[in-house]
Amino acid sequence: MTEPLPPTRRNRASLAYKLRYAAQNPDKIRTYAARVARDLKFRVSSRGHVAYYRAVMKSDTAKSPEAAVGSRSHERWLKLGQMQFDYLRGHGLKPDDRMLEIGCGNLRAGWRFIDYLDSGNYYGIDISPDILLAAQNTLVRQDLRDKLPHLTLVNDLKLQFLPSEHFSVVHAHSVFSHSPLDVIEECLANVGRVMAPGGFFDFTFDRTEGSEHHVLREDFYYRTETLTALAEKHGFTARFMDDWEELPHGQSKIRVTRPG
């Protein structure tokens, strides 16, 4: 009997993988078919990836804001947010840091960052107006309005409206896992300007050790060396965060640092 490939060696876009997965999970065929139909609809109606994924988030947020950011239950939403916060706090985050969170969603981790950081030191951006409205609800539930967080809608990742050399910490969880390479490069080409000297940027991604691929236009799988080389092209020092791999989350993490 053939041993199953490890997750990082699977090509989820291949026909063989899809047929095998369907045979093993017949109860999920209808859900996948609905995703394919939605993908075709949004590809036709959207100009560019940001518009496409904004439509995805609108559709998902209407059903459940927590599911829209990848949490199948409220308990999982809380655990994933706590995991991100604990990791970043254990890897350099301090209350006086000025933090930019790219793809802040409905503040799954963001509300914990807001609570921990000094007032006014959290800035969250997202492409989805629907999920940002849900983020406002999270602020109210957690009674964090007095911490003066910034929540801003964006159309791209050029970050032109943000001040230069301002943020000591930048964070993006489950953003590059939904982004084509040109969107990732746009971010890496511009984020250095808004980072303070010596600042760092942590981002997660779906890692593959085989062929890079995507499933529909929603989930993208990259080799580590592709993203570290792209970061180094734009003047960063890049490091794969090995200890993140020990945590119960399906993505990998890279930290890029702006030279001091």
Image (cartoon, grey):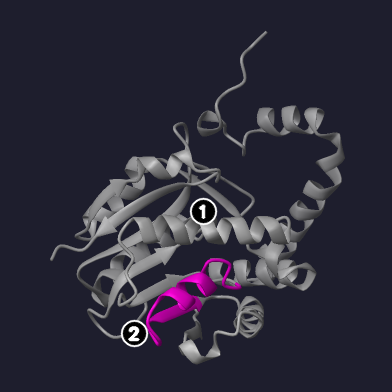
Point out the stretch of residues depicted in magenta: 106-125
The reply, left or right, for residue 198 in relation to residue 33 is left
| Residue that carries the numbered disc 2 in the rendered image | 162
What's the distance in space between the residues labelled 1 and 2, CA to CA? 24 Å
Q: Amino acid at mark 1?
A: Ser
Determine whether 230 is above or below 167 in the image.
above
Residue 88 position, x and y percent, is 39, 59
Instruction: Give me the residue at 73% from left, 57% from top.
Output: 73
What is the three-letter code of the residue carrying label 2?
Answer: Leu
Horizontal arrangement in the rendering, residue 113 relative to residue 138 (left or right): left
**Quarter location, residue 14:** top right
Q: Position of residue 198 (x, y in %)?
A: 18, 66
Does dot 2 land on a helix, a strand or a loop?
A: loop
Q: Residue furthest left?
A: 260
User: Which class describes the residues within 10 Å of circle 1: few (<14), some (14-19), or many (20+)?
Assistant: many
Element carrying mark 1: helix
- The residue under label 1 is 177
- Label 2 neighbourhood size at 10 Å, few (<14), some (14-19), many (20+)? some
Task: Place residue 76 in its image quadrant.
Answer: bottom right
* Res 157 visible: no
Q: How many marks?
A: 2
Q: Residue 122, how many percent across, how many down?
A: 42, 80
